[in-house]
Image (tube, rainbow, N blue to C red):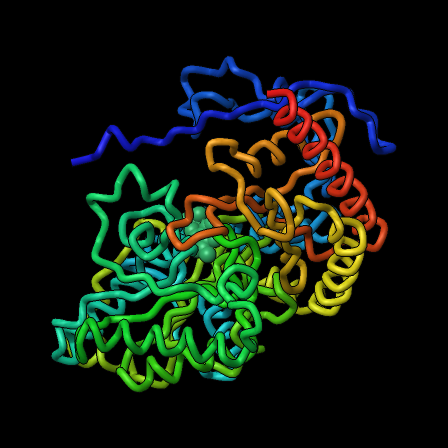
Amino acid sequence: MLNARKATRITPHVASPTAVPTTRIPVSSTSSAHFPTSRNPALLPRNFKKAPIEIDRQVGHWTRTTDGREIFDASGGAAVSNFGPGEIPRIKAAADQASARYGPYQCGLSYDTEPVQQLADALVRSTDGIMESVAFYGSGSDAVEAGFKLLLQYWQDVGQPERQIFVAREQSYHGTTLASLSLGSYWSRRDPFEDLLMDVHHVPACSPYRGKKEGQSDKDYVKHLQDQLRRKFEELGHGKVAGFVCEPIVGAALGCVPALPGYLKAMQEVCDDFDVPLMLDEIMCGWGRCGTLHAWQDEGVIPDVQLIGKGFAGGHEQISAMLIGRRRGIVDTIRDTSIIFNHGHTFQNPAKCCAAALETMKMVQEYLPNVRAMGELLMKRLKARLSAHVNVGDIRGKGLFVGIEFVQDELSKTAFDPQDAISAKIHEMGLTHAFQIHVYPGSGSANPHGKEGDHIILAPPFDINEDEVNLIVDRVGALVDHFFKEQNLAIQQS
Ligand SMILES: Cc1ncc(COP(=O)(O)O)c(C=O)c1O
């Protein structure tokens, strides 16, 4: 039964609209008024208190709204729109060509097409053959669900059906379907469904800003996390765990926290000792976002399952992928035992989406040097602009994937009350006429249950240039300054 009592409780407290123009960006409106409250009743909103803003048109990296705003996209939407006006026609042309030739839809039960095969080959090659087989789905959650079921079926086929428990990590998000929601520990999304979720165990994520003790070396912290995973596997019992799931760089739930060097290897060592497959969720952090095509390529680990989504086709098409590793013979096992991978969708392996993703792959590879260079610049300038701010606890990330965590004060690292919805309100204020910048909000980064902690994510397009990096830093800097001036004033006055 759904627990109605626990349904989402977003009660935004809006800072008083005092005009404190501390920056050269004029403050013409505040966060209270820019989300329309009326909405089209024919459309189910995600949030009944805030109807989304209507887009007039997208012009490059700018979103023009029907009420006259021009908002710079500093987060690729939800880390999806990875390319701007100069490059998008390439993806569109590839998709159109495939559609023209193969039709808008191909029944996956009966057919496949050249673009699908080419993309699968290119993906396998891009891993030097470490991954051997690929399937294409729609959303990231679809891909996670497929990985989850693939491992369950694999263990049945090798004669160990009692391996049904998954271990994942605290402060992670893996999707919105019931299995993927169970793997994640994003409290605000799990909460209404908690009683229905599957039995997934969570170990601490690698989160040095919060998790590393005073004076503890990175090496000791990684060892500590490794011991915790080992203890978890021992507690659950040999032969009981179906898979260990993690994001190499944690996105939405932690705010772009890269694993420390050696962490993923240490986790893989434990997985190997217990014969547990490693499933890497690269839906948000992979596919070039952090400076390498696959996030694990920097880490010296070999995934058994890898998931790609979000900007896989640059946001032009909706497509995700599940890649299966070669080393434990998962594909051979299923082929020789149950013959069928018992998991199919109507919309699977679509030619036009695969053609678009194949073109995107070439573009990502071309732009990797820019991702690394602009990522370094963004990090350097953002730190110079915001590190000293009393409410900025940490700025971290990799490539063009940067998170800013907010605190009540930087020394104590005390998080804000979740009821204050700080990151949601910063996101809202960013969209106002005063700032016109899209940042991606997240919460739950401050404690293992994911209830406290506020961060925003910057995940700009891969073809961003230095002027645009400066624009992001200026606007985000002004936004953070202004937001906390209002917020702190509201606290003093209350
Ligand atoms: C790491 C990760 N995994 C899975 C998902 C789920 O993807 P989707 O929203 O496309 O279902 C997300 C979405 O934010 C994600 O960040």
Vertical order, 219 against 313 (above or below) = below
The answer to whether residue 302 is seen in the rendering is no
What quarter of the picture does the N terminus occupy? top left
The image shows a total of numbered marks equal to 0
Figure quadrant of residue 20: top right
Location of residue 204 in the rendering, given as x and y in whole percent from the top left corner: 40, 64
Location of residue 110 in the rendering, given as x and y in whole percent from the top left corner: 29, 59
The residue nearer to you, when weighing 21 against 112, is 21
The residue nearer to you, when weighing 161 against 381, is 381
Q: Residue at x 44, y 28 (%)?
A: 10
The answer to whether residue 156 is seen in the rendering is yes
In this rendering, position of residue 77 left or right of residue 370: left
Q: Residue at x 47, y 21 (%)?
A: 49
Location of residue 115 in the rendering, given as x and y in whole percent from the top left corner: 49, 63
What quarter of the picture does the C terminus occupy? top right
In this rendering, position of residue 412 left or right of residue 63: left
Vertical order, 174 against 208 (above or below) = above
Figure quadrant of residue 479: top right
Location of residue 386 in the rendering, given as x and y in whole percent from the top left corner: 75, 49
Q: Residue at x 51, y 13 (%)?
A: 38
Vertical order, 311 against 224 (above or below) = above
Q: Residue furthest top?
A: 38
Vertical order, 432 against 395 (above or below) = above
Q: Residue at x 33, y 80 (%)?
A: 271
In this rendering, position of residue 72 left or right of residue 183: right
